[in-house]
Amino acid sequence: MPILKNAKKKVKVIAKKKTSNNEYKASMRTAIKNLEKTIATNDKGNASDALNKTIARIDKAAKKGVIHGNKAARNKSRLTKLVNDMK
């Protein structure tokens, strides 16, 4: 357990940031899973809409520092390629 006042505060701050970061990451993962399900149904119109929402979630997570920028770019590229390859 922390003894110093600033250490006690840091424990609280870290806990608060952790919950916030988990929300961004969970939101991003859910959007990716929903997009992959939409791609499986082969509906290009809905997939394009879902792609836009997913990219927004990925960008938000990267902007907040929850994921690395390169991971965000890699995910966006992979998902965009999947949507573009649909017939």
Image: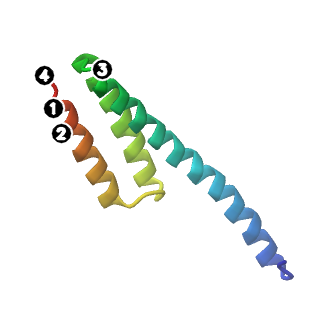
Q: Are marks 1 and 2 in contact (CB under 8 Å)?
A: yes
- Dot 3 crowding, Cα within 10 Å, few <14, some 14–19, many 20+: few
Q: CA distance from mark 2 to mark 4?
A: 12 Å
Q: Amino acid at mark 1?
A: Asn
- Dot 4 crowding, Cα within 10 Å, few <14, some 14–19, many 20+: few
Q: CA distance from mark 3 to mark 4?
A: 11 Å
Q: Are marks 3 and 1 in contact (CB under 8 Å)?
A: no
Report which quarter residue 82 is drawn in. top left
- Dot 2 crowding, Cα within 10 Å, few <14, some 14–19, many 20+: few
- Dot 1 crowding, Cα within 10 Å, few <14, some 14–19, many 20+: few
Vertical comparison of 10 with 50: above or below: below
The mark lying in front, picked from 2 and 3, is 3
Secondary structure found at label 4: loop
The residue that disc 4 covers is: 87
Give the numbered dot on residue 72: none
Tell me residue 40's x, y (percent): 30, 26
Front-lying residue, 43 or 70 = 43
Q: CA distance from mark 1 to mark 4?
A: 8 Å
Q: Earlier in the sequence, mark 3 or mark 1?
A: 3
User: Which residue is at a point 70% across and 63% down the rendered structure image?
Assistant: 13
The residue that disc 3 covers is: 41
Secondary structure found at label 1: helix
Give the numbered dot on residue 81: 2
